[in-house]
Amino acid sequence: MSTTDSIVSSQAKQSSWRKSDTTWTLGLFGTAIGAGVLFFPIRAGFGGLIPILLMLVLAYPIAFYCHRALARLCLSGSNPSGNITETVEEHFGKTGGVVITFLYFFAICPLLWIYGVTITNTFMTFWENQLQMPALNRGFVALFLLLLMAFVIWFGKDLMVKVMSYLVWPFIASLVLISLSLIPYWNSAVIDQVDLSNIALTGHDGILVTVWLGISIMVFSFNFSPIVSSFVVSKREEYEKEFGREFTERKCSQIISRASMLMVAVVMLMVAVVMFFAFSCLFTLSPQNMADAKAQNIPVLSYLANHFASLSGTKSTFATVLEYGASIIALVAIFKSFFGHYLGTLEGLNGLVLKFGYKGDKTKVSMGKLNTISMIFIMGSTWVVAYANPNILDLIEAMGAPIIASLLCLLPMYAIRKAPSLAKYRGRLDNVFVTLIGLLTILNIVYKLF
């Protein structure tokens, strides 16, 4: 083969989009589009029409720029097989590595707890309201569902990513179909609430405050940070040796962009997945319905199922199908997201055990044994929280979203300021945006206190 042919062949390989890239794109999307999306319409519904229009504009920038920043941090380590905890230790030393590993674990583990509560409530609502079966013991239901997910997890990361990618397209189709099918049931309640003469930008019920509080739910709803480290390691092992780190970074950015666009780019002209779904729910249910859904601690699909089940008179075929299908779709969404968040939680917990129990030496412990012990702890703690049943939206706003923001937004920005290998990213406008989103999300905690 001539030199020219070799160059052309190399360029073709670099420009090609591999099957593994598609699998990871759908895996990232599958991690994000889950329970958060099913609670997003409830929070958006409190503020009315104008705030959700503003959130529509912010959706893609939040999803793409924040996750790209985290991926760049993960890519900056010298070891292609090193995960985020090892990369952070390389940049900030052992003490800094321990602190960040703690934060990484406690940023993701509460999200897994939220999913444990959500899937238990969704299943019990479906069992009692749609199937009309006697109430089951909450502890038993939570244990059964967690063991079911543990069975899939036991077979490893590759199977989990494949399961998430296979479930993505049916889930997208279901959300779009439901969004379109809700149109005949739209009402003007959310528009009737809009009084242009009384609209305020500031104040407790002002547009800016409503959007600010909504950002925390958006950060949670569009979050696939727990799987970013595993994703970057996989892509580095696949591409870096052959094409170099810069190409690998561009490939990761491309995949993250596509995953982010899947979440929100099809928003316009009624083809959106997330935001159109939120709009459709907003026009179908009244603000009072949204408040009821929050009080019942269930995702919007479960509330829609109960809403159509309570309709008097002869119900349409769609209403009957939705009554049963909505909860099943919600369960699929939560299963999907649980797997992605489990990978991040496992990575963080294993990092802590290795640092404190084995001084960071992987050769002193069997990774299979470590994964099993970590799984027992993770599933056990998730079961306890699922049994306690705290309010999910309150958990997201007070704990989930702010901790995600510290990991997803502020940690990469701090690393860009301090780490020499990330110096080329300093002084960029998107860094200001990512930092601002992180600070606004964390400041939600202060607002809640007062």
Image: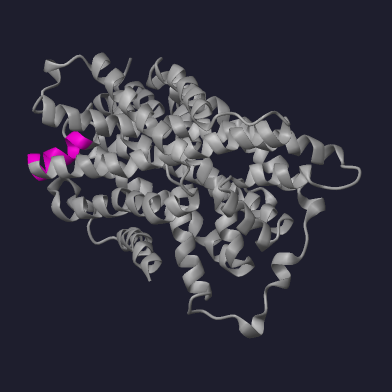
What residue sits 12% from the left and 26% below the top?
357
Front-most of residues 414 and 333: 333
Say whether residue 76 is left or right of residue 249: left
Q: Position of residue 174 (x, y in %)?
A: 67, 36
Front-most of residues 263 and 329: 329
Q: Quadrant of the C terminus?
A: bottom left
Q: Position of residue 267 (x, y in %)?
A: 61, 52
Q: Quadrant of the N terminus?
A: top left
Q: Position of residue 19 (x, y in %)?
A: 47, 24
Query: Is residue 1 one of those drawn in magenta?
Result: no
The image quarter containing residue 62 is bottom left
Front-most of residues 206 and 19: 206
What residue sits 51% from the left and 28% below the top?
165
Say whether residue 370 is left or right of residue 178: left
- Residue 14 seen anywhere in this rendered image of the structure: no
Q: Magenta stretch?
A: 85-94
- Residue 70 seen anywhere in this rendered image of the structure: yes
Q: Main secondary structure of the magenta part?
A: helix
Query: Is residue 88 one of those drawn in magenta?
Result: yes
Say whether residue 192 is left or right of residue 139: right
